[in-house]
Image: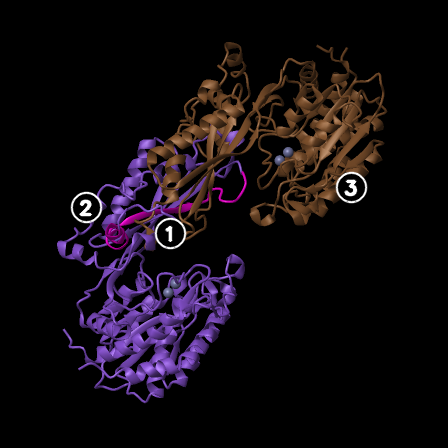
Chain colours: A brown, B purple
Amino acid sequence: MAPQLDGYFKQVDTSAGKFIERLRQAVAIPSISAEPQRRPDVVRMSKFLEEQLKSIGATVQAHPLGPQPGHPELELPPVLVARYGNDKNKRTVLVYGHYDVQPAEKSDGWNSEPFELTIDEKDRMFGRGSTDDKGPVLGWINAIQAHQEANIDFPVNLMMCFEGMEEYGSEGLEDFIHKEAKQGGVLHGADVVCISDNYWLGTEKPCLTYGLRGCNYYGVTISGPGQDLHSGVFGGSAQEPMTDLVRVLGSLVDTHGQIQIPGVMDMVAPVTDEEKDLYPGIAYSMDNLFESLGSKTSIHEDKDRTLMARWRFPSLSVHGIEGAFAGAGAKTVIPAKVTGKFSIRTVPNIESDKLDQIVFKHVKDIFAKLGSKNTLDVQLIHAGPWWVASPKHWNFEAAGKAVERVFGIKPDFTREGGSIPITITFEQATGKNVLLLPMGSSTDAAHSINEKLDRRNYIEGIKLLGAYLHYVAEEKMD
Amino acid sequence: MAPQLDGYFKQVDTSAGKFIERLRQAVAIPSISAEPQRRPDVVRMSKFLEEQLKSIGATVQAHPLGPQPGHPELELPPVLVARYGNDKNKRTVLVYGHYDVQPAEKSDGWNSEPFELTIDEKDRMFGRGSTDDKGPVLGWINAIQAHQEANIDFPVNLMMCFEGMEEYGSEGLEDFIHKEAKQGGVLHGADVVCISDNYWLGTEKPCLTYGLRGCNYYGVTISGPGQDLHSGVFGGSAQEPMTDLVRVLGSLVDTHGQIQIPGVMDMVAPVTDEEKDLYPGIAYSMDNLFESLGSKTSIHEDKDRTLMARWRFPSLSVHGIEGAFAGAGAKTVIPAKVTGKFSIRTVPNIESDKLDQIVFKHVKDIFAKLGSKNTLDVQLIHAGPWWVASPKHWNFEAAGKAVERVFGIKPDFTREGGSIPITITFEQATGKNVLLLPMGSSTDAAHSINEKLDRRNYIEGIKLLGAYLHYVAEEKMD
Ligand SMILES: [Zn+2]
Ligand SMILES: [Zn+2]
Ligand SMILES: [Zn+2]
Ligand SMILES: [Zn+2]
């Protein structure tokens, strides 16, 4: 039986102005987790959320996480755990979001003040955090409030986990979740998990996300002289670490994205026919890609192969070099010690440890061939695993029905090229299915200048979050 | 007839404490030309020098150079032109030095305050600018003063040109010299030129320097996407400029210093037998090299080949990349536009323009082979020519005799791997022979932390500068 949602939808439309005002207040707080001097603003944002949660009758606990690793003087912002409803006859849904944001300065090139929500004639709501991730976080609060205002029974027990360090590596959160998801913990007892912190593939069609690539990030350090040298004096008499490093970095991947490290591609799961059939129906085009790139410098010529390259094949990117001259102008230095940074996006069935071993071996083999007297060191800087869930799980079925109800169209089932490491933490800690349910669209420019959330995505998104909870309450468990 | 110098030498020893005090006052002024906020200190240093010059009876003019290119609000420090003596029966010697210094902060790793002259138990005088170039600049003033105090007739007319922007590219000086060396200009009428702004090859044996390598500095820019991309989202679907750039940079030179650009080595003048014979006698060893490098990562295994590599063969160094990730940590960026910086040290008979053409062609050929959709641009950022003078000129003969008189040993005739572009400017503008007459030693760490000048090099150096002027006054012109 399809849930009764018309009253709820109508209420969301009626309260839209109030919900946008709430977003305006949230965006006005520059809760930048990466900048120590902004830490009081991050804490202020947690207090604001606490008030909002209490105002709708949720219980809230702010859990301290102790000092920031490496910054003993800097307290981490708290994890907020809120509960709304505690009815043993209802299912319990655990949702996650983050209330911190990326850095932003008007002078970076914003067209408006980044911390003033600015709505243009196309109803695009510009502001840092609008789409990542304050809009979705407030979406859950707004959904509760609209139920209350419309006098509609809330269909589930909602357990909310909102953190303030996501944009700086979610410091401290993984341990917290593992501990609190256990029997007796404040995050125990969820039937399913839902995270709204990613984006539609395009701008028109909603999607449900069931996979993420992982990321193994490496540093290869080559050192020789005891200190930086002047290239006039020592050019020609010293072996130069940069000479060796660019050769090593040049051996990793080619222009067409083919990883040159033997053995990596052998670990990749083959594309099944069933999988292949998923791609043609997905709403995406090469023009979408070109628009995002701001250029036509694509590796592939067709949409399906491009999406596969993003979602289900590994890729290798060279990010830069630490220790070399990186400024403007012309400095004639021979850097003494340089670290090349590169990462590999991982997919099923790449085993992280095995990948490290073949990467280390390749780098050492190439360096050995150079015959250099310099010293090589190659290390894994961090690794986050890939994740794939079953899009056939009843959690996804429920979300799919909610999308169809709100938007009148079946969602695309997508994966993401990037990683959201907390996804797999929730899956492992709770043992439950995790759904990624995006609110914003591909043009929202999270992490860039002029971040925005379209009014439509926000308001229809609030409807979607509420509808999803109704369908989750009714969906037949597998 | 050898000049009478004993009285002068004795006076220099007698006045040594005063001369060291003068150096202490000069070092105390942090005349860092690269830092706009230090500009008043650079100007203060010019005033200090002016006073010192006037106190010994020299006439001084401070020539303004106008605003700093690219910094309309920042006035360049003046060029000081001083004259001591105006006797038509004496020869006129033009000397050059600079009163600005490299940046320095105690926190860079100095063992003492960089702007407090600190003398240790080995009579090493530590302080920024001690050897580069305040010691030599004051050397000329001290030489005049010692003549006065010992009542010895000064043997030449001395024309002194001291600038305050050497460590920031000698902004404005080249035009000034070309203009003022002409008939009627304040630098007109020199018979020879002497520059004391380089170093002995080792620590024991003085040298005279007759050659410098040039430097052509290039930037190769590869661009593709309209803005930096996230490697999770776009890794595998966009062609990455860094992938192309490390391959291009890896094609330039090998670990053993062999330049891989076709045609460069063909332009290098062959080593003559006569030239080959100069090397075995030069006081230098592989241990000297290893000590300077702080490692044993040399390209060559023997001294002669090492010195030739430094002085008379070209070398290619990769300095770094602008636009890529250069910080600590692990940023997962795909840089949209990256510029690799490399330079080639040039020697006779490399023609600068021809070199540019073959470098551009090589870079374009390698890039074309990659088959990339990205865009390549390669440019010359700056070029300074190589320089070789005749070490048989009477200016060098006079200096050689002065070295033998002061140190009891014949100097090594050396070249430098680096460039001192103003050398060739003086040669071209005056049409006269230019001698590089170093005061400091190879261990002085100019441009590094713990820069120093040994007391012996300073005091015997003052004797040398004075003695040189006496021999120049008497030497038979070619
Ligand atoms: Zn986010
Ligand atoms: Zn984010
Ligand atoms: Zn200098
Ligand atoms: Zn210098």
Asked if one can make out residue B76 in the rendered structure from this viewpoint, the answer is: no
**Which of the four quarters of the rendered structure image does ligand 1 lie in?**
top right
The residue positioned 62% from the left and 41% from the top of the image is: A102
Instruction: Identify the disc placed on residue A47.
Output: 3
- Figure disc tally: 3
Badge 1 marks a residue whose secondary structure is: helix
User: Magenta residues, as a range?
Assistant: B303-330
**Which residue is at 55% across, 26% downward?**
A214
Indicate the quadrant where residue A117 lies: top right
Name the one closer to the observer, B17 or B240. Answer: B17
Label 1 environment density (alpha carbons within 10 Å; few <14, some 14–19, many ≥20): many
Discs 1 and 2 lie in a common subunit:
yes
Which residue is depicted at the point 26% across and 49% down? B302
Q: Earlier in the sequence, mark 1 or mark 2?
A: 2
- Residue A437's spot in the image, x, y percent? 66, 24
A352 versus B340 height, above or below: above
**Residue B413: in sight, yes or no?**
yes
